[in-house]
Amino acid sequence: MTEVAYDDLKGLRACISNDFGPWGESLAVSQKLIDTFAELTTDKQWIHIDSERAESGPFGNTIAHGFLVLSLMPAVRPVTTYQLVGWGSAANYGIRALRFLQPVLSGSSIHARSRLLAVEQHRRGTLITQEVAIQGVGSDKPSLVFELQLLYMA
């Protein structure tokens, strides 16, 4: 794996790619996890928590909340083809172009992959934009896609 200093803009820009990197680790999305998220967020819509009703619903099963799937990104962190070094802290800067494309059924597993889209100098450090796709294992279509912006600082 190539090590690139977080403030080496030219080196980081060389890692920009049209191709997604490899899949990260997978994670099972259990009904218990979905129910816990429903309790925490008070989003108790039947398509998430009522297994009996969901069997005859549009997906044939309960589904994970879209924001639950998004929040699981750190657990299924995509593998990158480079390793950032030399930074002291990193902060979530924002998410752009978030799209929910396909539901995640209860009991299925998800994984993620990413590609580097942009590298910008920021007054506080280096702003990196990655496109991330989180997808059901074995599925041919992502469940959600978004552009994650991270700010790396000294």
Image (cartoon, rainbow, N blue to C red):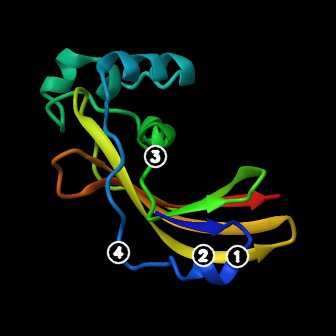
Q: For this view, does 79 lie left or right of residue 110?
A: right
Where does label 2 land, which residue?
A: 12
Which amino acid, by three-letter code, is at mark 4? Answer: Asp
- The spot of residue 2 in percent (x, y) is 51, 67
How crowded pointer 3 is (Cα within 10 Å; few <14, some 14-19, many 20+) is rated as some
Which amino acid, by three-letter code, is at mark 2? Answer: Leu
Q: Are marks 1 and 2 in contact (CB under 8 Å)?
A: yes
- The spot of residue 127 in percent (x, y) is 70, 68
Which amino acid, by three-letter code, is at mark 1? Answer: Asp
Residue for point 50% across, 16% down: 39
Q: Nearer the viewer, mark 1 or mark 4?
A: 1
Label 3 to label 2: alpha-carbon separation: 19 Å
Q: Nearer the viewer, residue 65 or 7?
A: 7
Label 1 to label 2: alpha-carbon separation: 6 Å
Residue for point 53% across, 21% down: 42
Where does label 4 land, which residue?
A: 19
- Badge 3 marks a residue whose secondary structure is loop
How crowded pointer 4 is (Cα within 10 Å; few <14, some 14-19, many 20+) is rated as few
- The spot of residue 6 in percent (x, y) is 69, 66
Of callouts 3 and 2, which one flags the residue occurring earlier in the amino acid sequence?
2
Which label is found at residue 8? 1
Q: For this view, does 7 lie left or right of residue 22?
A: right
Above or below residue 82? Residue 38 is above
Where does label 3 land, which residue?
A: 77
